[in-house]
Amino acid sequence: MGLSYDYRICDQTDWKDDDHKNASQFVWSMMAIDMNEISEKTHDEISFRFRFLEKIGMNIFTKPIDQRQLGKQLRSLRGYKTNIKFLPRFKFIRRHVKSLELNVENDR
């Protein structure tokens, strides 16, 4: 099954071409954090997961996370859905800590 996303429900009133491009590429960020939708309910969890990855040195963004900018982006993407398998927080953390563990072991 291919990776898919849907942002038709998002409020696109003030969106420009770059916003549509960013929305279409945000699915890769969602895959890194094992989340399948952006909503008011998932907003804090998504933010936590991005910060968690940054803190363990696995930031998926090219720059440090600006919480205000991330919050603004997540609010603009409310309603965004993907077919990514959702993992609960403990499984998300376990997956990335295991990856970190393997990186440390390979550095010997």
Image (tube, rainbow, N blue to C red):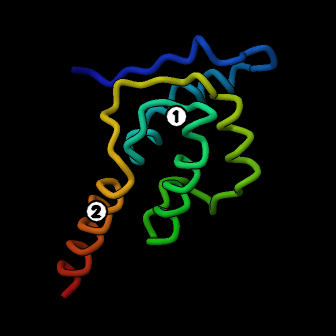
Q: Find residue 91 and name its label.
A: none
Q: Is residue 29 left or right of residue 71?
A: left
Q: Which residue is mark 2?
A: 94
- The front one of 79 and 69 is 79
Label 2 sits on a secondary structure element that is: helix
Residue type, numbered disc 1: Phe
User: Residue placed at 63% from the left, 21% from the top?
Assistant: 20
Label 1 sits on a secondary structure element that is: helix
Q: Residue 97: horizontal and vertical position, in percent?
A: 30, 68
Q: Is residue 31 above or below residue 25?
A: below
Q: Which badge, 1 or 2, comes first in the chain's sequence? A: 1
For marks 1 and 2, give the one nearer the viewer.
Answer: 2
Which image quadrant for residue 19?
Answer: top right
Q: Is residue 19 above or below residue 93?
A: above
Q: Which residue is mark 1?
A: 26
Residue type, numbered disc 2: Arg
User: Residue placed at 42% from the left, 25% from the top?
Assistant: 82
Task: Give neighbour class at mark 1: few <14, some 14-19, many 20+ (Cα, 10 Å).
Answer: some
Which image quadrant for residue 64?
Answer: bottom right
User: Residue placed at 69% from the left, 38% from the top?
Assistant: 73
User: Residue placed at 59% from the left, 25% from the top?
Assistant: 21
Q: Residue furthest front?
A: 41
